[in-house]
Image (cartoon, rainbow, N blue to C red):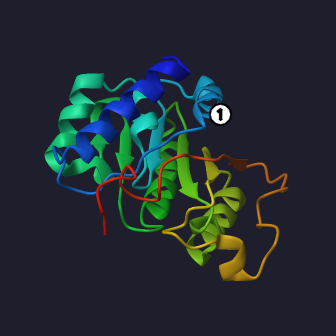
Amino acid sequence: MTAQDLIAFETEIADLFNAAKIRAPIHLYYGNEEQMIGLFRDVKPEDWVFCSWRSHYQCLLKGVPREELKAEIIAGHSISLCFPRQRVVSSAIVGGIIPIAVGAAMGLKRRGEKGMVHCFAGEMTSETGIFHESVKYSHNHQLPIRFIVEDNGKSVCTDTREAWNQPVLTYEHSRHPLVTYYQYHTRYPHAGAGQRVQF
């Protein structure tokens, strides 16, 4: 899967959404293809990937067939894509996926199974209590999990740094062993594809 493949998929979904072929919310990626491909070099088939409402790239990079993913998005499931066979789980509830990811990591450790959990979260979510508590718990209990903070500066149209009066985010320059942070700029709005009005 190349950066061009990822961009082509999101462009197709954006066109379908703007043509009113998708009647449910969508959240698109753009501008972080190389970072995602790099992150997924460390993701193995036995690993679990947990995401928020923006998860198209994770699904593709974890091996979900393109047409199967597209069908689920057209059916209105873009913000809650779950593919147990490929071990991908996502949720549209802000911060809701994080404790589930921690529980999955705890289960892997208790059962002595191979694999680890990769949990994706946006920059606003990374400033919430549920994120900090989950990172602390996972670190203290040495769970097989890593948290990836994706900062696109579009937290439901609210600037995270301004909202918290915090010029530098908690994990922006952190060397926490369980947290990977990266920043990117996207051409898409928080939701939708920039043409149709979306909540």
Q: Farthest residue in the front direction?
A: 195
Residue at position x 66%, y 62% in the image: 135
Residue at position x 57%, y 67% in the image: 125
Residue at position x 51%, y 52% in the image: 106
Return the x and y of residue 81 as percentages of the image width and height: 30, 46
In the image, residue 74 sits, relative to residue 178, either above or below, namely above
In the image, residue 9 sits, relative to residue 126, either above or below, namely above
In the image, residue 7 sits, relative to residue 112, either above or below, namely above
Number of on-image labels: 1
Q: Residues within 10 Å of mark 1 (few under 14, many from 20)?
A: some
In the image, residue 168 sits, relative to residue 141, either above or below, namely below
Query: Which amino acid is tagged 1?
Result: Gln
Residue at position x 66%, y 46% in the image: 184
Residue 62 visible to the viewer:
no
In front of the other: 194 or 87: 194
Residue 173 lies in quadrant: bottom right
Return the x and y of residue 72 as percentages of the image width and height: 20, 39
Residue 198 visible to the viewer:
yes
Residue 187 relative to residue 127: left or right: left
Which residue position holds label 1? Answer: 35
Return the x and y of residue 181 as percentages of the image width and height: 71, 50
In front of the other: 163 or 87: 163
Q: What is the quadrant of the C terminus in the image?
A: bottom left
Return the x and y of residue 98 as percentages of the image width and height: 49, 61
